[in-house]
Amino acid sequence: MRLKLFTFTLFAILTFTVSAQNARTILDKASEAYNKAGNVTVSFTLDAKDNKVKNTYSYDGKAYMKGNKFKIEIPDAITWFDGSTQWVYVKDTEEVNISNPSGEELQGISPSVLFNIYKKGYNLSYKGEKRSGGKVLQQVELTPQKKGTDITKILVEIDKTTNIFSTITLTDKSGIQNILSIKNYQTGSNIPETTFTFNKKDYPKAEIVDLR
């Protein structure tokens, strides 16, 4: 009986280790593909699902990325981040909030953080492959090692052929799922540095709220 228990335990450990190694290899390739791309322009759809009330809110957006810098455009807001300072322009109120977001705050919005988040503080698990739209997608689940974090689980799907992220699903502690589906992924475009900073001249009526 003890031998059987030992054998089962050893098998479970080995299986978990292989799963984690496979997951890290897949994410390493995807992260490397993003970091080597340089300038990246992405069109996406975000679905926010609240399973408790069975409500889904969806919108399309566009992101411009270069390293840890980004600009994200969605229907009701524009966000710029130059690597240290973030500006969020809310269209309805014509208000711009300026802040220096922490690493944890960037987890839910920064493309570069999402693409590299697995390297520290997360347990990794390979969940297998699935076919979608003629593509083979590899699924990897990330769960935070630290208890009590806002994000409880991240599921990523990566194109096996191109190593490009296809979907990223973040589940928070309230059970709400934010599903980011990448529709178009372009590399090599020339994105000027001014793209990642807010320019007051372009929004003369905007009210500036400095939260730093």
Image (cartoon, helix red, strand yellow):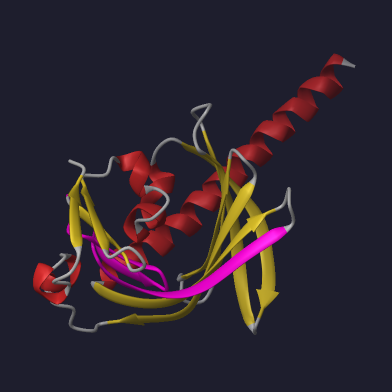
- Left or right: 184 in relation to 2: left
- Left or right: 163 in relation to 97: right
- Left or right: 23 in relation to 134: left
Give how far across and how far down residue 210 sits, in percent.
17, 47
Within the image, what quadrant is residue 189 found in? Answer: bottom left
Give how far across and how far down residue 35 sits, in percent.
29, 64
Give how far across and how far down residue 4 sits, in percent.
85, 23
Per the image, is 77 magenta? yes
In terms of depth relative to the viewer, which is nearer, 95 or 146? Answer: 95
Residue 205 to residue 118: above or below: below
Q: Which quadrant, please, contains the C terminus?
A: top left
By secondary structure, the bulk of the magenta-drawn segment is best described as strand
Residue 148 to residue 3: above or below: below
Residue 27 to residue 100: above or below: below
- Tell me which residue sits at (72%, 34%) in the image: 12
- Tell me which residue sits at (11%, 72%) in the image: 194
Give how far across and how far down residue 48 sits, in percent.
58, 60
In terms of depth relative to the viewer, which is nearer, 173 or 94? Answer: 94
> Magenta residues?
55-84
Per the image, is 85 magenta? no
Q: Residue furthest right?
A: 1
- Tell me which residue sits at (83%, 19%) in the image: 3
In terms of depth relative to the viewer, which is nearer, 90 or 43? Answer: 90
Within the image, what quadrant is residue 20 found in? Answer: top right
- Tell me which residue sits at (20%, 65%) in the image: 206
Residue 123 to residue 30: above or below: above
In terms of depth relative to the viewer, which is nearer, 83 or 12? Answer: 83
